[in-house]
Image: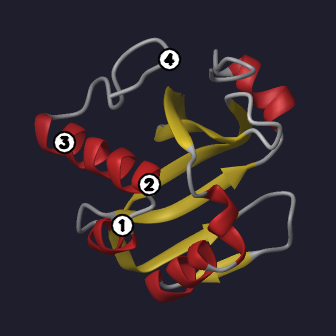
Amino acid sequence: MRSGDGDVGDGLGEPEKEFLERYVAAFEAYDMEALTSLIAEDASQSMPPYDMWMQGREDVLAWWVGPGYECRGSKLLAAPSANGCVAFGQYKPNPDGDGHAPWALQVLEMSEDGRVGRFTFFLDTERLFPLFGLPPLLP
């Protein structure tokens, strides 16, 4: 799995690492069927600084295939944990065709059933990516 300074989920057990590998593969493939199996039924998503809040797996996935469809083709790069949660740098395809540009710091909170319970996509990449050791562009 791609990583900034180490493997995703350093300090996690093998089942959790395997789960995160499946998440990265499903997100990068934009495979909604696979993502459905990885997201808790009562999952939520927010995207600061936007006044946007989705509650429930169906609402989250509906957004991903609607306005969030622009994230198709994204790449994820493991980041150090954020507030004790797994984090990834998300890079969307660069509109000029040159690699992938920073889009968000994805912070995933796990639910009690071992699925993703909350997604927070922090969009202030200019400030956050350097703090997390993430590169300014992926080739």
Mark sitting earlier along the chain (1/4) = 4
Front one among 75 and 13: 75
Q: Residue at x 53, y 39 (%)?
A: 75
Left or right: 105 with respect to 77?
right
Q: Residues within 10 Å of mark 1 (few under 14, many from 20)?
A: many
The amino acid at mark 3 is: Glu
Residue type beneath disc 4: Gly
The residue wearing badge 1 is 35
Asked if residue 83 can be seen in this view, the reply is no
User: Which picture quadrant has residue 3?
Assistant: top left
Say which label, 1 or 2, has the lower sequence index.
2
Residue drawn at (23%, 68%), measured in percent from left and top?
Answer: 113
The nearer-to-camera label among 4 and 2 is 2
**Given the image, on which type of amino acid does mark 2 rest?**
Phe
Please rate how many residues cluster around mark 4, counting C-alpha atoms within 10 Å: few if below 14, some from 14 to 19, many from 20.
Answer: some
Which label is found at residue 57? none
Quick one: label 4 or label 3, which is nearer the N terminus? 4
**Could you tell me the amino acid type at mark 1?**
Leu
Residue matched to label 3: 18
> Which comes sooner in the sequence, label 3 or label 2?
3
Residue 27 numbered mark, or none = 2
Question: Split into 4 quadrants, where in the image is the C terminus?
Answer: top right
The residue lying toward the viewer, choosing from 138 and 46, is: 138
